[in-house]
Image: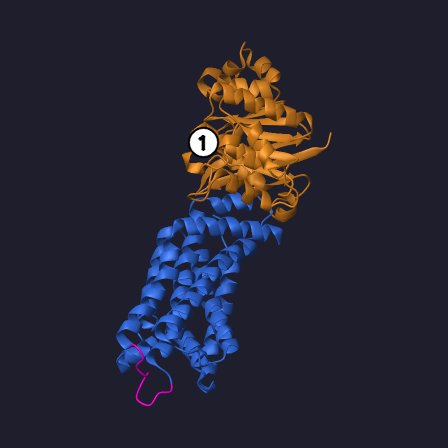
Amino acid sequence: MKAFGEHFNTELKLSLRGMDMVIFAICMPVIVMIILGVIYGSKAAFDGAAYTFMEQSFGAVTAIAICVSGVMGLPLVISDYRNRKILKRFRVTPVSPAMLLAVQVAVYALYTLVSLMLVYITIKLFFGCVFGGSLFLFLGAYLLVMLSMFSIGMMVGGVAPNVKTANLFCCVLYFPMLIFSGTTLPYEIMPKAMQRISDFMPLTQGIKLLKAASLGLPMEGVMLPIIVMAVLALICAGISIKFFRWE
Amino acid sequence: METTVKAEKLCKSYAGIKAIENISFSICRGEVFGLLGANGAGKTTAIECILGTKIADSGTASILGMNPQKNRKKLFERVGVQFQESSYQEKIRVEELCEETASLYREAADFRKLLTRFGLHEKAKSPVNELSGGQRQRLFIVLALIPDPEVVFLDELTTALDAKARREVWKCLSELKDKGLTILLTSHFMDEVEALCDRIMILKNGESVFCGTVREAIATSQREKFEDAYLWFTDGEEKL
């Protein structure tokens, strides 16, 4: 535990010094939330809806940090460490690959949690939104989405032969998910055809889950997203540990 | 004497080109063993096959009686390694790198003492990439000593160091050797090898052309100075 703590401290410091995650995982979601707030104000989500458009968007916007951390930050740091031969140096120490991965996962999990809190404070203070759902269910859903996105990232970081390939994979996964999963561009305003494409993305399923939990909607239609997320997490995490490469 | 490092008939080739062939030696506790040879002679490959970071095509290696691949976690509590190319995170500071390294071991040496010993205590707060080549090299020797190892591998020990710093490093290693530390090093400086190594192996094109003490090398070659003896072993034409 001591090793994990000290390792975590150093890696967090290094990551903060890099600044990119502060901008993309922490500032960006807050800015997106403010922009949506300026556009939609206290409008209802649709005619006769019990919640506002902003309240509906909350779940989606909190997923931005998960996407940025899991599909961009995490795989790039792992492949960068391999490329710089830092993992090779770790290989001749007693540390296990699982712990190295766990430290990075913890660093990026912290980013997403800080981001989640800031987004919540923003819509609560500035736009008077209320959290109508179950906090317990929401956190559970959030954790599940995080787990599955992070495991995709670990897999990409774990198996990509070099930083360039990792970067390419990340872009291919990251930008479509960021734009078409409804994180930045709300799912509800997409044309029907686009929604259908969007439905294929794992993050879209995750966001549906987050929305249902944050709005207190009935949990009937959520079995599919839960299964998709859980299976994805299991497969990707398994692959990333099984095929972990030091060099 | 107890054997701490053992290599038996190690062979390794890359894409059909042999890097090392039939390398065998053993090192006793408290002994300093030097692996010599020109660039590309196979020194680093030999070290990596022993450490298990490269898998030998054939042959076996053990450190402290353990297989470095099977007993990796247990073994590297007691073994320190300095690779030829130093690697560290961007923007990391000297003391952070030391802290992080120390945190990986159950029992680590006091890195502040080591930094002082190697003249780096004033640089503790500096970013590693702002150190000079020599300072960085000393830092990586410090990192290799942080586990308080019984065996240490030093690849290209003092390449970037100035004369004074090299002497300091020698002195420090000699003291550690007296306390029972086993050292395997590679070096291109023959004075360093003479000053430190109990025994040496000279590699040429991946094969051992000599294994024994410096004195034996001089005697076999019938040269006066060790450097000439080394050249005699590595330079095939003159030998004919």
Query: Which one is nearer the viewer's eye here, A86 or A243?
Result: A86
Query: Which one is nearer the viewer's eye here, A110 or A75?
Result: A110
Secondary structure mainly formed by the magenta segment: loop
> Which percent across, then down, holds residue A172?
33, 63
> Which percent across, then down, holds residue A204?
38, 75
> What residue sits right under mark 1 in the picture?
B40
Q: Which chain is tinted orange? A: B
- For residue A121, above or below residue B109: below
Query: Which image quadrant: the N terminus of chain B?
Result: top right
- For residue B160, above or below residue A40: above
Q: Determine the chain carrying the residue at label 1.
A: B
Question: For the point 42% across and 37% down, which residue is it?
Answer: B129
Instruction: Give the SS element for disc 1.
Output: loop
Give yes or no for residue A164 being in the magenta stretch.
Answer: no
> Which percent across, then down, holds residue A190?
27, 78
Number of marks drawn = 1
Task: State the image quarter where residue B127 is shown.
Answer: top left
Q: Which chain is tinted blue? A: A
Question: For the point 64% across and 39% down, which residue is it?
Answer: B63
Three-letter code, disc 1: Gly
Q: Is residue A51 visible?
A: yes
Task: State the image quarter where residue B142 is shown.
Answer: top right
> Within 10 angstroms of label 1, few (less than 14), some, or many (20 or more) residues?
some
Which residue is most to the right?
B1
Q: How is the image coloured?
A: by chain
Left or right placement of residue A130 versus residue B1 in this view: left
- For residue A29, above or below residue B211: below
Span shown in magenta: A41-50
Which residue is most to the top?
B224
Left or right placement of residue B209 versus residue A47 in this view: right
> Which percent across, then down, holds residue B239?
49, 16
